[in-house]
């Protein structure tokens, strides 16, 4: 009998070990599948949106204003409008309609790029408005495929770093198409988009085929549901002080990021550098951020993850301020300056675009989805970018791009460090208060339940 019990116990242990191995293999497969599809999807979205930033458009103007500023501003204006409607569309988008929305947006964006090549300047600027309008909700759609899973930290990290990596790659491909393939600067975006479109549709199909979140996913990260108008209002009111601080900080970070991405060739003189320098710098930044964010998969406690994320963001903001304030004293090479600024900026910005709100929903057991939060912070941020570019152009501020960016980075880093510190304190206090209320409720239930009070 003892031998049989020993055999049964050993057999049970082997079965449990095999189950654990199978779960780990399943998780690894999901990370490769979903993470790879998400990363490539948004990288290809950038190929439809950002290649034009590699062109200088010298000799052209938009009714007396800088042509490139006009292209950027009008594209972002379309993006802003899409983000505004995305607050409703993405938060209410059902999973059955995601892929159709995804494909229609991609096709419309490429059609707009063809229009940019066909129409004569400055009238072709209108095509970039349609391009921005088409792509404004893509981030929210892609994220909706991967949120609410125990491995979302890793998946969101891969999606987020695609934003860093793809910005430099899009510029480099744009420069390559013009310098090596001799494609005109107006047709260059459409040519690159033509290569990207079929791959993007295929990646969307791969995301569509992902399995739904498991019971374990729901237990750890909460079920994700659509939000109607009343649900959105109630959610914001419940966390208004915290969300207001986060939204204001993200507004500033997004404006700074857009200035860097769209006018990097104006900010730094790279005339004697390789066309692939932007991609090389962004690749290193990508790997560093991926390693940092991926480590959060080991945080089972959502509040600990949130506090560590806030600490990381605050540190990035402070370093960004220090580097901008002491640029002349540091006397760094432009490439080193670019790397440090990119790393600090993207750590702060991507935290909220990827991991933070997924953990926020899980921590406070919120009935909603990440797309609602991201659509709001993007809408507010892009409104700021449009305002800044329009003000600079129409009031004709006489300031170099490098000086403008350095002053902005210094101010944004300092203000955001304060905002996010206060937000972190409020988050922890809210969590602690919620925990005390839950404990009090459990004690009251225990006291009132007859089965625990029977003699």
Image (cartoon, rainbow, N blue to C red):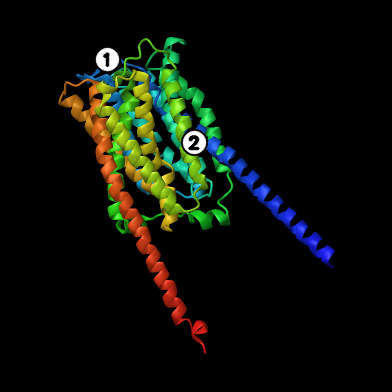
Q: CA distance from mark 2 to mark 1?
A: 43 Å
Could one spot residue 157 in this view of the protein?
A: yes
Residue lying furthest bottom in this view?
455
- Compared with 240, 339 (above or below) is above
x, y (%) of residue 56? 32, 16
Q: Could you say where residue 280 lies in the image, as x and y percent from the top left?
A: 45, 21
Looking at the picture, how far across and down is residue 411, in whole percent? Answer: 23, 34
Q: Quadrant of residue 317?
A: top left
394 horizontally vs 114: left or right: left
What is the x, y in percent for residue 430?
Answer: 34, 59
Q: Which mark is residue 60?
A: 1
Disc 1 is placed on an element classified as loop
Query: Measured along the vertical axis of the image, is residue 272 above or below residue 12?
Result: above
- Please, is residue 141 above or below residue 258 in the view? below
Location of residue 165 by image quarter: top left
Q: Residue furthest left?
A: 395
Nearer to the camera, 337 or 356: 337
Classify mark 2: helix, strand or loop.
Answer: helix
Q: Kindly identify the residue that appears in the image at 52 percent across and 49 percent down.
A: 149
Q: Residues within 10 Å of mark 1 (few under 14, many from 20)?
A: some
Q: Are marks 2 and 1 in contact (CB under 8 Å)?
A: no
Q: Earlier in the sequence, mark 2 or mark 1?
A: 1
Q: Visible in this render: residue 230?
A: no
Q: Is residue 349 left or right of residue 387?
A: right
**Residue at image x 42%, y 10%?**
179
Foreground of the two, 320 or 135? 320
Write down the residue under mark 2. Answer: 291
């Amino acid at each position: 009998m003892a031998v049989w019990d020993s055999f049964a116990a050993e057999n049970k242990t082997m079965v449990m070990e095999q189950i654990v191995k199978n779960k780990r293999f399943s998780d690894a497969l999901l990370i490769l599948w979903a993470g790879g599809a998400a990363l490539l999807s948004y990288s290809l979205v950038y190929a439809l949106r950002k290649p034009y930033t590699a062109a200088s458009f010298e000799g052209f103007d938009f009714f007396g204003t800088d042509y490139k500023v006009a292209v950027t501003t009008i594209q972002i204006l379309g993006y802003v409008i899409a983000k505004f409607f995305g607050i409703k569309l993405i938060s209410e988008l059902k999973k059955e309609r995601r892929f159709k929305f995804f494909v229609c947006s991609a096709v419309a964006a490429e059609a707009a790029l063809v229009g940019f090549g066909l129409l004569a300047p400055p009238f072709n600027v209108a095509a970039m408005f349609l391009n921005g309008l088409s792509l404004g909700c893509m981030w929210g759609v892609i994220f909706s495929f991967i949120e609410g899973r125990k491995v979302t930290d890793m998946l969101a990290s891969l999606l987020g770093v695609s934003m860093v990596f793809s910005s430099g790659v899009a510029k480099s491909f744009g420069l390559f198409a013009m310098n090596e393939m001799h494609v005109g600067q107006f047709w260059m975006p459409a040519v690159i988009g033509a290569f990207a479109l079929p791959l993007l549709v295929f990646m969307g199909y791969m995301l569509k085929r992902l399995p739904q979140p498991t019971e374990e996913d729901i237990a750890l990260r909460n079920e994700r549901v659509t939000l109607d108008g009343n649900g959105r209002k109630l959610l914001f009111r419940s966390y208004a002080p915290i969300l207001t601080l986060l939204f204001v900080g993200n507004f500033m970070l997004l404006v700074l990021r857009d200035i860097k991405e769209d006018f990097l060739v104006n900010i730094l003189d790279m005339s004697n550098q390789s066309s692939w320098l932007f991609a090389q710098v962004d690749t290193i930044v990508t790997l560093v951020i991926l390693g940092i964010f991926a480590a959060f998969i080991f945080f089972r406690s959502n509040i600990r993850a949130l506090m560590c994320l806030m600490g990381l963001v605050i540190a990035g903001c402070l370093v960004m301020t220090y580097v901008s304030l002491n640029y002349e004293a540091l006397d760094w090479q432009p490439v080193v300056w670019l790397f440090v600024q990119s790393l600090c900026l993207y750590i702060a910005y991507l935290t909220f675009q990827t991991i933070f709100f997924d953990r926020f929903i899980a921590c406070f057991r919120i009935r909603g989805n990440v797309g609602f939060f991201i659509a709001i912070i993007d809408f507010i941020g892009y409104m700021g970018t449009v305002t800044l570019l329009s003000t600079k152009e129409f009031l004709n501020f006489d300031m170099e791009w490098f000086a403008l960016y350095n002053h902005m980075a210094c101010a944004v880093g300092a203000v955001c460090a304060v905002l996010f510190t206060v937000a972190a304190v409020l988050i922890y206090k809210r969590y602690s208060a919620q925990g005390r209320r839950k404990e009090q409720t459990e004690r009251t239930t225990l006291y009132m339940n007859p089965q625990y009070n029977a003699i």
